[in-house]
Amino acid sequence: MIPATQVAKFRNAVPFWMSLLLVPVAILGALKGGWTVVLLPVMTWYLFSILDAFLGLNLENADLETGEDQLKWYKAITLLWAPIQFCLLFWMVWYVPGAEHLSALEKIVLFFGVGVITGTVGIVYSHELMHQKDKGERWLADGLLAMVLYSHFHTEHLQVHHRYVGTPRDAVTARYNEGFHRYFARVLGETYASAFRAEKAMLARKGLPWWHHTNPFWKYWALDLYMIVLAVLLGGWIGLLLFVWQAFVSVWQLELTNYVEHYGLTRKHLGEGKYEHVKPRHSWNAAHKASNWLLINLQRHSDHHYKPDRRFPLLQNYTEAEAPQLPYGYPIMTMAAMVPPIWRRVMNPRVRKWRKMYYPEVSDWKPYNKAQTPMPRGAS
């Protein structure tokens, strides 16, 4: 008989397993076609937005003394998702190109939906795994990123974003008044270049050239190439095009999330290229219950940047006095970000309120508003 304590732990973790419901929906779309091909984005964007409206906020915080052994049911979903996504994605790459009951448009829409879940779920789980010390979990993170051809995100996120968030050195900190479409075009190139420079600089400090075998970019390139070759072998050139399409949509979802998480929030420049330490106030926080189930508490982003090594069930919620709050969960906020006038109407007043609240002594915000602010001489 299963102990009552284990049953309780499993029951508490079950809501975070809701992502698995998207798998049969994807299979249904592939087998049936028609209106079912739109179900994936409808569920991830609209269903969870509706659930947020009905279920409200989760303001409770887990006990930080909770041991690793008590988190196994939470950890399990992040470990299981990688092989599940791999099987689902490449089954669809094999099956869909030859499915005569699917029109060309249905195939494109279906793989748009696949990209929504490989971005909304796959990259989010990869993000959780890459922050862990276990090498197996980090390899799973790399595998998930390779499935969307964005392997360099591992380096960019850990070595650049977390170190320089809220400063001009971080490409994915969206600047005040910077619309998402302009932001997206900018970060695609900047993040790859900054990730490569970070690894090159790390090797240089060891007296090694960038082409040294320890440069993780060799692994990134090999994994990305493996996924591309596998897509061609299973689905031919049509399969490859559909695979690349879902990868693009997935990255678009990721960068939409990045855009929302830090829009307009900046760390105070202390002079000589130095900035204040990262605090909860430097990320937008959202306590919406259902979307945090889907995104494994990613919306508790203020605490994630404050304590990056915390596993997702232990991430803490903050009040408005400690961290800025989004009015809605990520599904609604990312949809709003796609329409810059709506986004500015909703978020710019909140950014101005944040500035007055936390930095009343700063009178000139122009340098912080620029998409590219020159670093002071001698800054590293």
Image (spheres, helix red, strand yellow):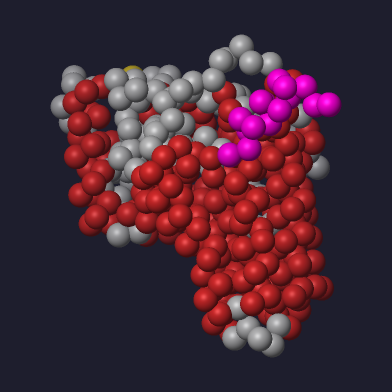
The residue at the far top in this view is 65
Q: Which residue is the extreme one toward the left?
A: 363
Left or right: residue 105 compared with residue 139: left
Which of 179 and 331 lies nearest the eye of the viewer?
331
Residue 160: x percent and y percent?
53, 36
Residue 2 falls inside the magenta stretch: yes
- The majority secondary structure of the magenta stretch comes to helix
Which quarter of the figure is the N terminus placed in?
top right
Residue 7 position (above or below residue 183): above
Q: Is residue 87 left or right of residue 123?
A: right
Q: Residue at x 68, y 40 (%)?
A: 78
Q: How many marks?
A: 0
Residue 374's spot in the image, x, y percent? 35, 38
Residue 116, image x and y in percent?
54, 59
x and y percentages locating residue 364 in the rendered image? 18, 31
Quarter of the rendering containing residue 281: top left
Indicate the quadrant where residue 64 lies: top right
Magenta-colored stretch includes residue 195: no
- Which image quadrant for residue 131? top right
Start and end of the magenta stretch?
1-15
Name the residue at 20% across, 31% down: 353
Residue occupying the point 36% across, 45% down: 53
Name the residue nearer the viewer: 81 or 159: 81
- In the image, 208 versus 98, the foreground residue is 98
Asked if one can make out residue 121 in the rendered structure from this viewpoint, the answer is yes
Residue at image x 60%, y 39%?
Answer: 16
**Residue 268 can be seen in this image:** no
55, 148: nearer the viewer:
55
Q: Is residue 334 above or below residue 363?
A: below
Does 79 sit above or below residue 378? below
